[in-house]
Image (spheres, rainbow, N blue to C red):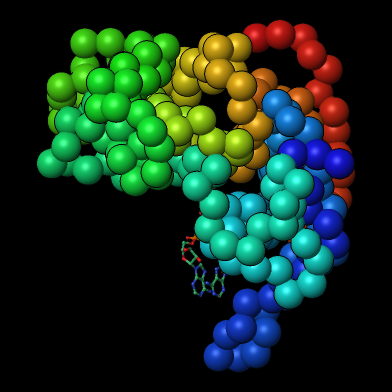
Amino acid sequence: TGLIDIKGVTLAYRTDTGPLPVLDDLNISVPEGGFCAVVGPSGCGKSTLTRLIAGLMRPDEGEVWLHGARVTSPRATVGMAFQNPVLLEWRTILQNVILPLEIVPNKQTKAQREARARELLALVGLEGFEDKRPSELSGGMRQRASLCRALVHKPDVLILDEPFGALDAFTREDLWQTMHQLRAEEPFTSVLITHDLRESIFLADEVIVLSGRPATVQYRMAVPDTGP
Ligand code: ADP
Ligand code: ADP
């Protein structure tokens, strides 16, 4: 069994025109520390899958397990980053990254929370930008900050839903390198949604191809560890 275990998951959305089957008997297991990329055509159910892992939805059939417990409600142990980072403009970059630590109950002092956020920001190359506002940063820098925010509370699972999709090719490849650095420093288990097969191979240990309506796993590929 893995840190994430998706067992026989089937899901249909209820719509005005009847049920829309989206996922059919999905079985995916991601070991602790694993990095799983999910690729597939637009609309095949990738974001739906991330919502199931985060506990934002429940499957019609099957089970989603995280760390040996069934997921039945939203989990604080999941960190998420999306294509368009939603950073709060009225807070500084540091204050944005600290946010999950203020929301999730923990015993840390203010100084400890701040040190944790600064440590992560330095790791992704944002040292010196802590007191800037989101709009003062480039798109790539904002995405770096949103990755820090997703990781600041040391979640069991980092869900990345096309986080590099809106970036230019150079910035995107810089972020890939940053992901490798983060992974070397911070233990996390990740599920990456992407349309970019090169990205999936560069970042992940396993690539899962979803397609069909409802979607099933069409193909699984272990990526040999060739290093960054
Ligand atoms: P992907 O992330 O692969 O693009 P999604 O998981 O967003 O796919 O969506 C899968 C399918 O389910 C799509 O056809 C989408 O239109 C539909 N869908 C997504 N969310 C909802 C919803 N809340 N209600 C009804 N249909 C939805
Ligand atoms: P993505 O491909 O990243 O999932 P979408 O544009 O498909 O993004 O979906 C954006 C939002 O709209 C999601 O929250 C999804 O649940 C919702 N959504 C998508 N398709 C439908 C639909 N057919 N009916 C209702 N909500 C939908």
In front: 88, or 98? 98
Q: Position of residue 227 (x, y in %)?
A: 71, 8
Asked whether residue 181 is in view, the answer is: yes
Residue in view at x 63 percent, y 63 percent: 72
Name the image quarter holding residue 228: top right
In front: 214, or 9? 9
Say left or right for 90 vs 126.
Answer: left
Say left or right for 6 vs 158.
Answer: right
Asked whether residue 170 is in view, the answer is: no
Ligand 1 - quadrant of the structure image: bottom right
Q: Quadrant of the N terminus?
A: top right
Q: Position of residue 223 (x, y in %)?
A: 81, 23
Q: Position of residue 222 (x, y in %)?
A: 85, 28
Name the image quarter holding residue 166: top left
- Vertical position of residue 210 compared to residue 111: above or below: below
Name the image quarter holding residue 221: top right
Residue in view at x 17 percent, y 31 percent: 92
Q: Position of residue 90 (x, y in %)?
A: 13, 41
In front: 30, or 165? 30
Residue in view at x 53 percent, y 58 percent: 74
Q: How many dots with numbers?
A: 0
Residue in view at x 45 percent, y 33 percent: 153
Furthest residue in direction front, as rendered: 107
- Vertical position of residue 123 compared to residue 8: above or below: above
